[in-house]
Amino acid sequence: MVRRHGIRFVQVARLGYWEADGITVLDDSREPTKIFLAGDYRLSDELKRSGTVPLDSGVHRCALKFKAWVSEVFAL
């Protein structure tokens, strides 16, 4: 449906642990053919580094760090 309507579909991810590492653009297309399930630095990398497991309570800090921040940086 995205391809049929020519909608721009951009897939971005964190490049590393620090915000200063920046982001990486995995795909930027109006005719996407692949969904990237993992980028250069994944949530699982973060969890392994800190020795924790994902929890479902309170503020979703992972979503803020791995989704919101990356989207905001790309939009600039």
Image: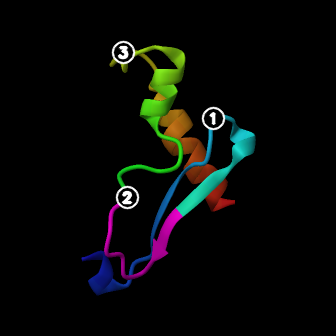
Taking depth in this image into account, of 7 and 49 the one nearest to the observer is 49
- Disc 2 + disc 1, Cβ < 8 Å: no
Could you tell me if residue 47 is visible in this image?
A: yes
Q: Is residue 31 left or right of residue 69?
A: left
Mark 2 residue crowding within 10 angstroms, few (<14) / some (14–19) / many (20+): few
Q: Which residue is mark 2?
A: 36
Mark 1 residue crowding within 10 angstroms, few (<14) / some (14–19) / many (20+): some
Q: Secondary structure at mark 1?
A: loop
Q: Quarter holding the N terminus?
A: bottom left
Q: Which residues are magenta?
A: 26-35
Q: Which residue is mark 1?
A: 17
* Residue 55 sits above or below residue 68 on the image: above
The residues bearing labels 2 and 1 have C-alpha atoms spaced at a distance of 19 Å
- The kind of residue tagged 1 is Tyr
Q: Position of residue 29 (x, y in %)?
A: 45, 78
Identify the residue shown where x is 47% and y is 69%: 27
Q: Main secondary structure of the magenta part?
A: loop
Taking depth in this image into account, of 33 and 70 the one nearest to the observer is 33
Q: Secondary structure at mark 2?
A: loop
- The kind of residue tagged 2 is Phe
Identify the residue shown where x is 47% and y is 51%: 39
Q: Position of residue 42 (x, y in %)?
A: 47, 40
Q: Residue furthest right?
A: 20
The residues bearing labels 3 and 1 have C-alpha atoms spaced at a distance of 23 Å
Labels 3, 1: front one: 1
Identify the residue shown where x is 53% and y is 35%: 64
**Residue 57: image tag:** 3
Going from the N terminus, do you reach mark 3 or mark 1 first? 1
